[in-house]
Image (cartoon, helix red, strand yellow):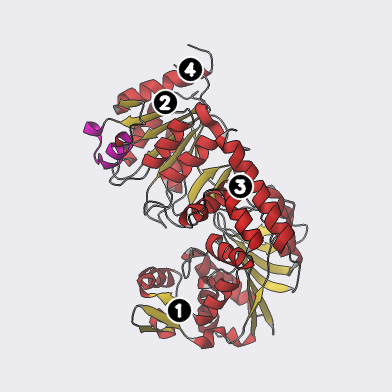
Amino acid sequence: MDEYKREKLEIELLCSGIYDAYGYDFRQYAKASFTRRINQFVSDNGYSSITRLLAEILHNEDLIHTLIKSISVTTSDMFRDPHIFKLIRATVIPYLKTFPNIRIWHAACGRGEEVFSMAIMLKEEKIYDNCTIYATDMNDAALESVQKGIYHISRIKDFTGNYIKSGGRSSLSDYYHAKYNNVKFDNKLLENVTFANHNLSVDSIFLEANLILCRNAMIYFDSNLQKRVLNLLDGSLSNGGILCIGSKESLVGTELAHNYKSLSDGMKIYKKVPGYA
Amino acid sequence: MRDNIEVILIGGSAGSGRLLEIIIKSLPKDFKIPLVIVRHISEGNSLKEYYNLLSEQTGKRIREVEDKELMSTSTTYFSPPGYHMLIEEDRHFALDISAKSNYSRPSIDVLFRSAAKVFKSSVVSIILSGANDDGAMGTVAVKNAGGLTIAQNPSNAPFPKMVDSAIKTGKIDLILTIDEIIYHIIELDSKSRGIL
């Protein structure tokens, strides 16, 4: 059997096995990068094939959590794409200020770099106290790690550079304490944050938000699942609300395109204006 | 010579910027085979404006890839800084910010491996100047899938380490100067359109 045909079949069997056994749905993940991460996991953990991995998963429930933790992509930086945060500070915050209660959703928040970035900005713009912030991810280990607020000290250089570029009003070091090789961000930044396990590929609408950030999660989904997620985000956003997606993701060609108006050319941040185009 | 080439992959790192520009500028306007290029540049340095300028100067379609973009002919694609770039079976590009490979994201290996799976013997890979080992494993994948593998002649490469690593795998078909690379891919393009 052709090596790549076999690999494709093994990936299909793995996805349907995981779904039937545990309800995690990877069947509509973009195949190329999902396969790459599975192959990495298989070789890092010494399985002789993807099929062997599936057999182990079916017999060992703990392994599915290890797998999810390992293949979830949690790479991010604080104030990643700082120009987006700059735009949010200049344009979105004044809009949010018009509401007495503001709801913000960080969908697929990973290790929380974006949650802390936004919380810092909301504090600096003095609207944090009016905000209810939801941070969700399918990966429980990631959610636990956000709540600890600990990052390796080697990341501070990039975090700080981005913070400055984003128009930070103070100094990033005001918000963390360094200890040994780590920094711990101030717990007060998480006071208004509610954490929940939410899986974009299977779970449904749970709030109506004024601002939703869902960046670099949809790149891992195929176009059908991407559609589902966009509809989910759309249904969770109030009219006039703001949607921010990843800098290489796009609404172009989706059903949502005609209801969303870009706040700035070339930036992936949109205002929901039904019937806009 | 092959007549079924569907895509040409190029990996470049330190010292490859000028070479890539020479290659792109030297290809005829009606060059059809898509060029898909991973070039190592540091994150946050989008070269979109440069690509637009190059596009204006040459009259060719040159793009920094967006997620789910469909690969089409007569187009040059560059990976966006900070993202791995892969190709799906249905010829859409897929981006990915998972762990770096060879200290690189984008990684040449990641692109070459995914393209080898999809295009098998109808892919050409080219390794240019660079100061690391990225692209060597990808070259192996392209060769094993039946593709044609090319390395820039190391004596002409400003930083020869990357080409040397690819050549050391024993899986390089052709070692060529930049002029020869240009000549060769123009011939491949003509051949695939039945002109030669």
Name the mark on residue B190.
4
Contact flag, marks 3 and 4 (Cβ < 8 Å)? no
Query: Mark 1 Cα within 10 Å, few/some/many (few <14, many 20+)?
Result: some
Q: Nearer the viewer, mark 1 or mark 2?
A: 1
Residue B91 appears anywhere in the view: no
Q: Which circle marks residue A31 in the picture?
A: 3
Coordinates of residue A267 in the picture (x, y in percent): 56, 58
Q: Is residue B166 shown in magenta?
A: yes
**Residue A48 rendering spot, x and y as whole percentages:** 52, 49
Give how far apart the Cα atoms at labels 1 and 3 are.
Answer: 32 Å
On the image, numbered disc 1 is attached to which residue?
A: A150
Residue type for callout 3: Lys
Quadrant of residue B162 in the image?
top left
Horizontal and vertical percent position of residue B166: 33, 37
User: Which quadrant holds residue A231?
Assistant: bottom right
Q: Name the residue rendered at 30%, 40% in the picture.
A: B165
Q: Amino acid at mark 4?
A: Ser
Counting labels gives 4
Q: Residue at x 68, y 63 (%)?
A: A200
In the depicted structure, whether residue A226 falls above or below residue A126: above
| Tag 3 and tag 4 share a subunit | no
The answer to whether marks 3 and 2 sit on the same chain is no
Tags 1 and 2 both on a single chain: no
Q: Which region shows up in magenta?
A: B154-167
Residue that badge 2 annotates: B27
